Amino acid sequence: MAGLAIYGDLQCDVEGNHTVIINHILESCKILPPTGENDKKLYGAITEQMVSRMIIDNPNRKRIICMAVTAPKYELRDGSPSSWSAAIDELTSGYLDGQQKLFFVSAGNVVDPDEWKDYPVSNKSMTVQNPGQAWNAVTVGAYTDMVDIDKDNKKYSEASSVAPKGGLSPYSSTSYLWEKWPIKPDIVMEGGNLRKDSFGCWECEELSLLTTYYKPSEKHFHFTNATSAATAQAAWLAAQIQVQYPDAWPETIRALLIHSAEWTPMMKSQFLNGKTKGCYKELLKICGYGVPNLNKALWCMKNSVNLIVQSELQPFDKSEDGSRYVTKDMHIHELPWPKELLLELGEIPVSMRVTLSYFIEPSPGEVGWKERYRYASCALRFDVNGTDTKEAFLARINAAAEMEGEGYESDGGSVKWVIGKNNRHLGSIHSDIWEGTAAELAVSNLIGIYPAVGWWKERAWLERWNRKVRYSLVVSLQTPRQDIDLYTPVYNIIKAKVPVTIAGMK
């Protein structure tokens, strides 16, 4: 894992002749005892203690925490919180020390050779393992592009790969069986493949990732695979974003990774059985949001523009007479879309993707852990105006923000989302895509961020009702037409204004 966290794709580095530049360092701490195992009730406390020790030793470092330890013996199989996953949510939220943290955790693996034979059915039945259900963590599953087997080797002459190129890795667990809890994994990274023949399915070096060996005096390289390898690579990706954007919040790096992710054509072929929102929900449960793209996370192209907002709001407050607790803040961000250009483009297809990332604070004492509307401190939602006027949009958002009762949300107006609000509003990161024409998008330039119910409001006697929550919002505008320049007019609009709600464009 250390080799992948340092270098990323080491195979590419070894085979190439380019210079490898490393701009980050590694720390390591152990949460497993030399022999036996820890008390399962202490998993969360031990994890928190180890991270706290690293922070105390070097308090000024920007950290990306990566953990590939799971507890399959103690998984709950329904996605509900455990004491371990809740500890990770508490740790990342900043509740303990005021520092929000970016945390990567592996989804866990399918390891039984008999289950490998039933790929991909076995992946659907193998649920993401504890603590991968943590809301704030980036849970990493695995896909694979590795399918090449040495057919010249007589031993492998009849062999083939289990997973197709670009498909879900045979190792990867999923949240296919979960109902109301967050959809996991969030993203998938290369996790290797398996070889199959008439005798069964087997691990092999050719279909695994190259990495460093822990005893360099014996040999320099070794191979690894599965969701542990995928998690280490995801941490490497996040480090590259942190280097490029040193002031980016953990919430922002998380948002950029997921915002840049796409499903491969093979994933859609394997698991997308239609175009309904229910079909996309099934795909999400198996492959998350897909494979992140570092270039898309970091850079704008001429035909693709990313906008980033880092802000905070206070979700709840006391009513004027002090008799009850009500929703307080909502934010409206006006996007600098080039309206005239979009209207001129008319029926040319354009897509807008929106990703909202924030960290929740878990309900203390395991109260409300059976209900997703009671586990989180608060929830945030986003919506866009579509064809609504500003006044109609504000009225719609206000109704959603002020409505009492758990789970009430805006009706979405005229915007036809790919994933849909009922699917994307699980967990604490929400991402969706609107595909339409340039003319339709020309008037849709308002995004509203508003709070939903949470225990900060419902358990007001705990004195957290007046807390603020940070959020990161990433919005992209893109067209498949390479000859259309969206970047320059958007840049000029931003340059001509004082940047208040839109920042971080590069």
Image (cartoon, rainbow, N blue to C red):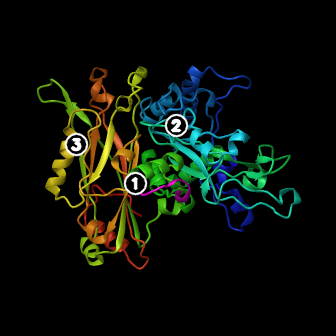
Determine which of the numbered discs, if any, sits on residue 276 in the image: 1
Locate residue 236 relative to residue 324 in the image: left or right: right
Categorize mark 3 by other alpha carbons within 10 Å: few (<14), some (14-19), many (20+): some
Q: Earlier in the sequence, mark 3 or mark 1?
A: 1
Circles 2 and 1, Cβ within 8 Å, touching? The answer is no
Please state the horizontal and vertical placement of residue 441, each as a whole percent of the image.
28, 66
Q: Quadrant of residue 172?
A: top right
Q: SS class of the residue under badge 3?
A: helix
Picture residue at 56% right of the left edge, 55% below the top:
270
Residue 321 inside the magenta-drawn segment:
no
Q: Nearer the viewer, residue 200 or 336?
A: 200
Q: Which residue is mark 3?
A: 400
Q: Amino acid at mark 2?
A: Pro
Q: Amino acid at mark 1?
A: Thr
Q: Is residue 247 visible?
A: no
Q: Which residues are magenta?
A: 268-276
Categorize mark 1 by other alpha carbons within 10 Å: few (<14), some (14-19), many (20+): few
Q: Quadrant of residue 150?
A: bottom right
Q: Amino acid at mark 3?
A: Ala
Q: CA distance from mark 3 to mark 1?
A: 25 Å
Q: SS class of the residue under badge 1?
A: loop
Picture residue at 38% right of the left edge, 56% below the top:
418
Determine which of the numbered discs, if any, sits on residue 59 in the image: 2
Q: Earlier in the sequence, mark 2 or mark 1?
A: 2
Instruction: Give the residue at the far left of this rendering.
Output: 321
Q: Nearer the viewer, residue 112 or 198?
A: 198
Circles 2 and 3, Cβ within 8 Å, touching? The answer is no
Locate residue 51 relative to residue 333 in the image: left or right: right
